[in-house]
Amino acid sequence: MPATNAVLHDKRYSADGIFCEPPKKLDTAAAPVEQNSQSQWNTNDYHWEERDVTDFARQAVSDRLLEDRTIWSDANGNLLEIVNVELSGDAASNVRKGKRILTYALRLKVTCEGRRNGARLRGVLSSDEFCHDDDQREVVVNLATEPMESDAGVEVNRAMKAHEMFARVLKKKALPLVEGACVWLRDHLEEHRG
């Protein structure tokens, strides 16, 4: 009769230690847990494991850009400011055979709105997709402006001058700010990828 696990774990066979050691109860408190591991079950981070870090990236870039949201203001209460930051795409921290691998494909969209003497303008700065395996660190950001409905009684010439001024300010200040935020986000994800 062939031996089965039930037979091999019989006390008669484990007593002499030839077939197998007697069953032992594991002490979970004594088992060391690696501090750098992404999870407790993945010993030495050997098996492929993925952790979604998209929300972490969204929160980080929003906090950075909305911390000082005013791009331009004057003494009369006119201002141009960031009103919305939207990060789309996916970011993940992966481990395999003890190595950490960061993967992401993201797009950043920043909406700015400004008003000056009754004239109002919205500017949308949107990046091209940037990902973990790009050759260049810089990210291309495009600017699109659209006039918003101005207050009643605003002259067309005055509104056009305000729109031109806002477009120049967006190109000079907001465009480099958003490009810098994309590069900063890349570095921040690399630094905090686990």
Image (cartoon, rainbow, N blue to C red):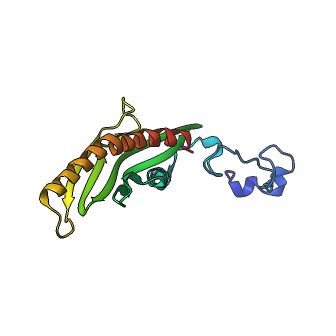
x%, y% of residue 97?
57, 37
Residue furthest out toward the bottom: 152
x%, y% of residue 172?
32, 40
Where's the C terminus, which quadrant?
Answer: top right
x%, y% of residue 31?
77, 49
Identify the residue at horizontal 13%, vertical 59% (top origin). Answer: 156
Residue furthest out toward the top: 135
x%, y% of residue 32?
76, 47
Q: Quick check: 33 above or below 76? A: above
| Relative horizontal placement of residue 106, taking residue 93 as reference (left or right) | left
Count of numbered marks: 0
Identify the residue at horizontal 68%, vertical 53% (top origin). Answer: 1
| Relative horizontal placement of residue 34, taking residue 147 as reference (left or right) | right
| Relative horizontal placement of residue 111, taking residue 17 as reference (left or right) | left
Please state which of residues 79 and 39 is positioned toward the viewer in this rendering: 79
Please state which of residues 188 and 11 is positioned toward the viewer in this rendering: 188
Residue furthest out toward the left: 156
Identify the residue at horizontal 20%, vertical 56% (top origin). Answer: 146
Residue furthest out toward the front: 75
Please state which of residues 74 and 168 is positioned toward the viewer in this rendering: 74
Please state which of residues 58 and 17 is positioned toward the viewer in this rendering: 58
| Relative horizontal placement of residue 183, taking residue 37 as reference (left or right) | left
